[in-house]
Image (tube, coloured by chain):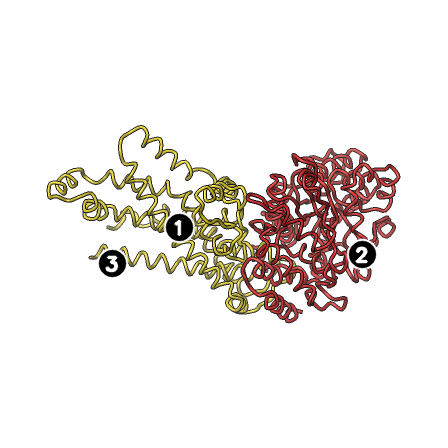
Chain colours: A red, B yellow
Amino acid sequence: MSFSRRAFLALAATGCAASTAPPGRKTAPLWFTYGGKNRQVLEGLVKAFNLSQGEHWITPIYQGDYFEGLAKLRTAIAARRAPALSHVVGEVVPYLARADVLEPLDDYPGARQLDIVPALGQAGSWTGGAEQRLVALPFNRSTPIAYLNGKLFAEKKLAAPKTWDELRAVARAFTQEGRHGFGCPIDWWFWAALVGQAGGDVVEPDGRVSLGGEAGERALDFWKTLVLEDKSMKPPPGRDYNAWEQTNQDFLGARVAMIWTSTAFLKYLEENAPFPVVAAPLPAERRRAVPTGGTHWIMLRAAPAEQKPTAWAFLRFMHETANAITWATRTGYMPVTRAAIAQLEAEGYYLKHPNDRVALDQLGVARPWPWSPDLFRVQREIVQPRLEGAVLGGKGTRQSLDEARALATRWR
Amino acid sequence: MRPSRRFDPLWMLGPTLVLLVVFFFVPLLQAAKSSLYEWDLLTPPRYVGLDNYRALIDSGELGHALGTTLIMSAVVVVGSMALGLVLALALNRPTRFAGFVRSAVFSAYVVSWVSVALLWLWVLDADAGALTALCRALHLPTTHWLGNPKSALYALSGVTIWKIAGYSMVLFLAGLQDIPRSLYEAAALDGAGAWQRFVNVTWPLLRPTAAFVGTTSLIISFQVFDVVRVMTQGGPVRSTSVFVYAIYEQVFLNLRVGRASALVVVFFVLLLGLTALQLWAWRKKGAA
């Protein structure tokens, strides 16, 4: 809009992006958006990349959670200080692509030959993703899975629920004073899983936002039954990733016996729980279904041209079998290349670590998202508040979803 | 009074004026301009006139943020003043124990908001929180304090009161210690009981202190952000989406710079109005 604003944003964006690259290396910044265990693993891989060759140097810079990182990325783009490399949640990739800020990757050497698991790449993650220019490569990809407190389940001699009815029964069986049987954030991602299991799709193949129709209502009513009628499900306080973290803490503190959350937390929960953690696939209603989640690598079009080859070299490095395996086995995310999965299978890794296998097996029933630039706005501003309104605010299920559908249709 | 050198006051005001212009007036004007555009920081801004204001009104977000903020402010101002006053009256004595309690109560004020929020997340946990355990022990009904839209805002108000009551207490203590003992002795000789002494001596002389405490509590309550960000993120069902958090959510989570700017402008006008009202009330009182 004006020079003064751009200058201000530039100052804010460049902040503390200092590099410690040895002289003579081509450098590129990597903006990443998670802390804890996953951060340690990523920084270890960056270090390995920097030591593995003498030409390039990646400088990793932490930028808060996914949304904080996205806000900073937008600020940097507006200030013309975009980093060469970052990663963003799948919902915003089409939005960023429409804004024309993503670097097309098709013409980079070997881009189309990367041995990516189809359901996790751009072509499989979005309906119509293959028809777009390649702008995103899979990084930390996940599905929601169930985590069970192995000690409590063994004591009651109960197994992981395979249907909604079983889930309801199990949740009730574990609920007592000071403990809920089931914990799950009232969040669009988990509701999308329920809609798929009830036989619907949040967005129809023609792009119409149906919110699952009758399946959407059944999904929401199921939550209401667990929260309001049975009082066996604990919706954590807070929203977004704070609510997810609360769910994790409830699980680790044995305040809930079973939770739904991302595969992203597999190693974190396994290492910190004072009881055996058992991962299980989500149950089926009319069918089995899960959405995929996590983030994709992106390169920014506005980044300095001399940084882009370094960023691309790092992306190639991350897709090498050994590195894809390191990332997946130390975090809980899924391996993103077929060769990595094949090697893990051959080495018997999944026999030794059956929890790691759960998300991978669910990929067969994963539902792709539509390539819709407005999807994340529909999610954040229209659907998410109405899910909370229906489950926690006492609003009618049909009324809430009809309202959301009408608004989403008008948006389109 | 006229200064001997006409421009000296201007030189002295200069540094403050520059800071005010750079960090307050310019950003405010920029926000007012941005509020007339639809902008996501990625694509070029598009002029939309007053559409951002209209969208905030039509969606009910403006009214909701206003209502939530005013309710929280009312609860926090009344609660922190009442608690601060009661504590000051109870602890206005020269004993070691009173000194220890005064320090303990005030310590909450110097702890960071984030630490306080994390502590209260545990206290208010629906299953294992201390408050829930206390209610159960006393056979009182419990609720999901932060997960229930009917209780979440009051829970956050309670946390804010707990945090700032020590500050109110210290100010009231200072006010109490300024009241001459002779007035209490005279009132006692006239046969006034404890309540009459409070109503006729203490409270009238504490009014200026109370006005100051009320004003500062109001400012703090309008600026509340950290507890909301850490404890509820505006939820559940937007029941704790106070003004400052709503601005943050629009710009950082919804990627809507225009609507966030519109909220900033409305917030500024609201605070300006409240400040004007307060100045008018003080001047009127001064004139009387």
Dot 3: element: helix
Position of residue A201 measured from the top left corner of the image (x, y, whole percent): 73, 63
Q: Is residue A342 among the parts visible in the rendering?
A: yes
Position of residue B233 measured from the top left corner of the image (x, y, whole percent): 55, 51
**Residue assigned mark 2:** A124
Q: Is residue A64 among the parts visible in the rendering?
A: no
Say yes or no: labels 3 and 2 on the same chain: no
Chain letter of disc 2? A
**Residue assigned mark 3:** B284
**Type of amino acid at the residue the image marks with label 2:** Gly
Tell me if label 1 and label 2 are in contact, CB under 8 Å.
no
Which residue, as the protein is rendered here, is positioned at the far top?
A: B96
Position of residue A10 measured from the top left corner of the image (x, y, whole percent): 61, 49
Chain letter of disc 3? B
Distance from the alpha carbon under mark 1 to that under mark 3: 26 Å
Which residue, as the protein is rendered here, is positioned at the far left?
A: B190
Q: Is residue B6 left or right of residue A188?
A: left
Q: Residues within 10 Å of mark 1 (few under 14, many from 20)?
A: many
Quadrant position of residue B110 = top left
Dot 2: element: helix
- Which of B162 and A114 lies nearest the eye of the viewer? B162
Q: Residues within 10 Å of mark 2 (few under 14, many from 20)?
A: some
Say yes or no: labels 1 and 2 on the same chain: no
Distance from the alpha carbon under mark 1 to that under mark 2: 51 Å
Badge number at residue B76: 1
